[in-house]
Image (spheres, grey):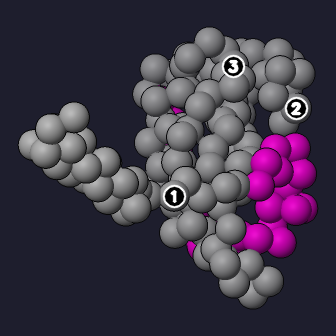
Amino acid sequence: MNKSNLLAVSAIFILSACSTVNQPVEREYLDLVGNKEAVEKYWVVERKVAPQYPAEAGKNSISGCVEFTLLIDGNGKPQNLTVIKSFPGSTFNKKAYEALRKWRWTASESNDQNQPVLTTIQLDFTTQKSVNHAEAYSACKI
């Protein structure tokens, strides 16, 4: 191998090693799905935003819910919101998503490392005298 090839290979090796040094490290999260009490040991809701009732659903007296999985990140912000259940259909998904994106959490005293957690949250939409009260109650466990 001649000197210029050796120099080129060395430069590539050094540059590739440097590029991996400053790569962001993915922070591990705790999977606390289904354990709301455990979530509260890490994060306390600082700001809840109530979702707007979709006009069409209100006009038609429809009740329902949307349940999400989400990651409460190290800054207390919701990330990776994913609908895991919605009733009826996707009627309330958009308004529920818009509201939940605005929620904020504060780390509890015992969570001094701001440990991210994966959890679920259900937002309910109910109206008096809804035409689907029994179905919504059953599907959403309201």
Q: Are marks 1 and 3 in contact (CB under 8 Å)?
A: no
Q: Position of residue 139 (x, y in %)?
A: 83, 21
Q: Amino acid at mark 2?
A: Lys
* Residue 25, label in figure: 1
**Distance between the alpha carbons at the discs numbered 1 and 3:** 38 Å
The quarter holding residue 19 reads bottom left
Q: Quick one: label 1 or label 3, which is nearer the N terminus?
A: 1
Q: Quick one: label 2 or label 1, which is nearer the N terminus?
A: 1
Q: Which residue is mark 2?
A: 141
Horizontal arrangement in the rendering, residue 81 relative to residue 16 (left or right): right
- Which residue is depicted at the point 65% across and 61% down? 116
**Nearer the viewer's eye, disc 1 or disc 3?**
1
Secondary structure found at label 2: loop
Q: In front: 47, or 142?
A: 47
Tell me which segment is drawn in magenta.
30-54
Q: Amino acid at mark 1?
A: Val
**Distance between the alpha carbons at the discs numbered 2 and 1:** 39 Å
* Label 2 CA crowd tier, 10 Å (few <14, some 14–19, many 20+): few
* Residue 87, label in figure: 3
Q: In front: 5, or 30?
A: 5
Q: Is residue 19 visible?
A: no
Q: Amino acid at mark 3?
A: Phe
Residue lying furthest front in this view?
2
Say if the magenta span includes residue 42: yes
